[in-house]
Image: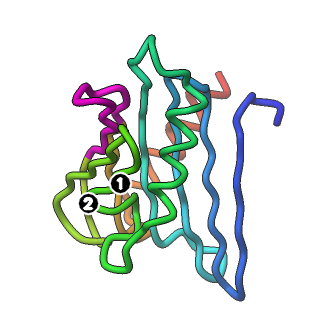
Amino acid sequence: MADDCKELTFEEGQLKYRDRYFGWNPFIGEEIVWQDHKIIWAMNYYGVVSSEVIPVNQVYDFLRKAMRQITDDKPFRGPGSFKESDFEYVDENTGTIEQFTGFERIIYQGQEIYRLDYHGGKVKLSRNKYRTYFFSHFRISRAA
């Protein structure tokens, strides 16, 4: 993409999902869900691999395995815990799909080598006077 982001999308019926992220290590991104062309849910995240011993690709390969263990009650990241060989994935969060915050870590042989912080939840669009003022003012100041 022109802005150097990576983008993953999925569509089914009236639902559309998009995950856009920038960077490799560290990285930042957002996930958004639309229903009938209106945003209904979003999440932001920032992550970094801190290990100088384990290659970044190997850490991300393990992370993808952990993400495949997603649960129905908290589908915004991986399971509470997942282990394979010397790697352990741990996710700690508060809230529900409606509003949440949390962080995930990967631990290798007892040492944290990766961390990602995230937050998000349900989005409700409103056409109130403050929102209209903000965006019209923002457009005017950006055009100047």
Secondary structure under the numbered disc 1 in the rendered image = helix
Q: Position of residue 101 (x, y in %)?
A: 24, 52
Return the residue at label 1. 130
Nearer to us in this view, 116 or 143:
116
Q: Residues within 10 Å of mark 2 (few under 14, many from 20)?
A: some
Q: Tell me: residue 100, above or below residue 144.
A: below
Q: Which residues are magenta?
A: 103-115
Identity, as a three-letter code, of the amino acid under mark 1: Tyr
Q: Position of residue 105 (x, y in %)?
A: 30, 39
Most frequent secondary structure within the magenta stretch: strand
Q: Is residue 133 left or right of residue 138?
A: left
Q: Residue furthest top?
A: 52
Write the residue at 63% across / 46% down: 20
Q: Work out whether residue 126 can be spotted.
A: no
Tell me if residue 109 is in the magenta stretch: yes
1 or 2: mark nearer the eye: 2
